[in-house]
């Protein structure tokens, strides 16, 4: 079959989603790596909370309470932005993480 390749002008537009809708989409099933939060090391600067694209980091009384795995897609941004001297979030392979 000789299918004609589409030029960029003929390609259909991708989806556009409104901002601030992360909680409408449970992206946890996408995850291959899981963030593990170490409460002992955490200084509660909340940088990870600000950067998480899925609103998965839950904060209570100014402190990280938990990472809601229903929303966490395992992108690892939280572990990247956690200050290097603190390193309170470690990404581990999902199949090696405690259930
Ligand atoms: S890995 Fe971290 S930044 Fe990424 S979705 Fe999960 S909690 Fe949010
Ligand atoms: S970025 Fe690191 S130190 Fe700051 S609140 Fe998140 S886990 Fe804690």
Image (spheres, rainbow, N blue to C red):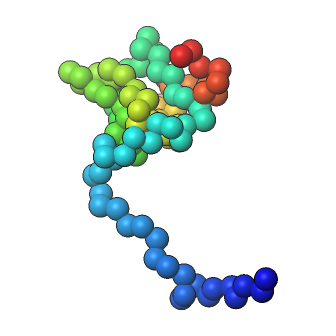
Q: Residue 28, how many percent across, how many down?
A: 47, 36
Give left or right: position of 98 versus 48.
right
Q: Quadrant of the N terminus?
A: bottom right
Task: Give the residue furthest to the left.
Answer: 61
Q: Position of residue 16 (x, y in %)?
A: 38, 67
Q: Is residue 53 above or below residue 90?
A: below
29 in relation to 99, above or below: below
How many numbered callouts? 0
Which residue occupies 36% across, 31% down?
A: 57
**Residue 52 visible to an observer of this rendering:** no
Q: Residue at x 37, y 46 (%)?
A: 25
Which sits in the foreground, 53 or 38? 53
Residue occupying the far right of the picture: 1
Residue 12 in view (yes/no): yes
Q: Residue furthest top?
A: 40
Residue 93 quadrant: top right
In percent of width and height, residue 10 lies at 54, 87
Residue in the foreground of this view, choosing between 38 and 82: 38
In this view, which residue lies farthest toward the front?
Answer: 1
Of residue 28 and residue 35, the one placed in the foreground of this image is 28
Question: What residue is drawn where x is 43% and y is 29%?
Answer: 69
Residue 81 vs 3, above or below: the answer is above
36 shown above or below 23: above
**Left or right of residue 69, residue 21 in this image:** left
Q: At 52% across and 33% down in the image, what residue appears?
A: 79
Q: Quadrant of residue 17?
A: bottom left
Q: Position of residue 27 (x, y in %)?
A: 44, 42
């Amino acid at each position: 079959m000789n299918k004609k390749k589409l030029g960029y002008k003929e390609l259909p537009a991708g989806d556009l989603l409104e901002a601030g809708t992360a909680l409408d989409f449970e992206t946890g099933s996408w995850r291959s790596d899981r963030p593990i939060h170490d409460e002992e090391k955490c200084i509660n600067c909340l940088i990870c909370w600000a950067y998480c694209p899925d609103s998965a980091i839950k904060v209570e009384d100014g402190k990280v309470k938990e990472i809601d795995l229903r929303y966490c897609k395992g992108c690892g941004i939280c572990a990247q932005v956690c200050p290097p001297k603190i390193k309170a979030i470690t990404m581990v392979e999902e199949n090696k993480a405690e259930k």
